[in-house]
Image: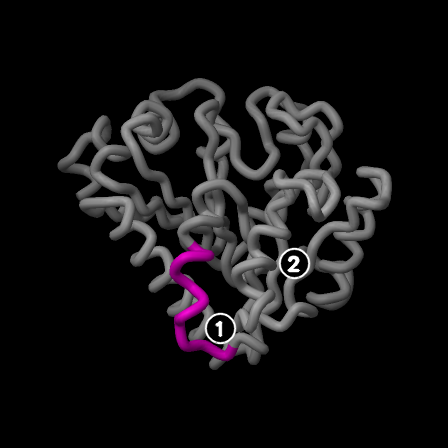
Amino acid sequence: MAAPTVIILESETAVSTKLCDLVIEKANSAIERDGRFTLGLSGGSMAKFLCNGLPSRKTAWSKWQVFFCDERHVPYLDPECTYTIYKSKLVDNGGPLPSENLHPINPELPVEDAAKAYKEEIHAMFGGDNLPRFHLLLLGMGPDGHTCSLFPGHPLLQLSSEIIAPISDSPKPPPKRVTMTFPMINNCECAIFASCGGGKAEIVKKVLESDGGEPLPAARVRPTQGELIWILDKAAASQLKAQSHI
């Protein structure tokens, strides 16, 4: 389990560019090696970075298989739906990604059934019942240190075998969501966080320079046989011990 690689850049624009560079690099490498690229997406600022930067990039888009690290259990037309944000930029109006390669949850099912169906879809994509190994997961972090829909102190943090779980009591609305869990997150080949702004500085320090105690969910992302990368702007990195991260 390698220590995280921390990349500190001048601006949010530089973070977005570096993130997209890394995604394309990982995609092209995976396609050359495995014939496809399996990717997990998150919402929030990650969606903004990717939707602005990826569509113009050169890659074999037909070889991408794109899932969601977590998703709100809301209709596709709801502005809270992460899938619709990506679909509008990467698929619709001549976007580069084939629509069948972007895999949403089914919000018409009860949240427990939506999670079960999504788990089955992921297993079908990877084959068999072995623990799926994504090439890349792109993760966000909230001000409380949550990632995906894995919140501090929540029972979902204790799951040891399920790869996808429903949550009906999210402390951040909307309450119903479907999320990847740590067994699958930490089985990925690479996980990347991207955080910008001084408002993230304190929680970035807590996650990357924890001094003991119960680790926050974002700090528990440590791929067991993979790579962990944090891309930060100077404001988000402002409370880190500079000599150990730059």
Q: Residue at x 75, y 28 (%)?
A: 168
Cα distance between the residues tagged 1 and 2 = 15 Å
For label 2, count other residues whose C-alpha is less than 10 Å away and answer few (under 14), some (14-19) or many (20+).
some
Is 242 on the left or on the right of 47, as rendered?
left
Q: Which residue is mark 2?
A: 132
The amino acid type found where label 2 is placed reads Pro
Question: Is residue 4 part of the magenta span, yes or no?
Answer: no
**Residue 19 position in % (x across, y down):** 36, 56
Which segment is the magenta one? 50-60
Looking at the rendered structure, the kind of residue marked 1 is: Ala
Between 32 and 139, the residue placed more toward the observer is 139
Between discs 1 and 2, the one toward the N terminus: 1
- Give the class, few, some or many, for how many residues have Cα within 10 Å of label 1's Cα (few <14, many ≥20): some
Rendered residue at 48%/49% (across/down): 47
Find disc 1 in the rendering and name its residue: 30
Where does the C terminus fall, quadrant-wise?
A: top left
Secondary structure mostly seen in the magenta stretch? loop
Where does residue 97 sit, x and y in percent of width and height? 57, 70
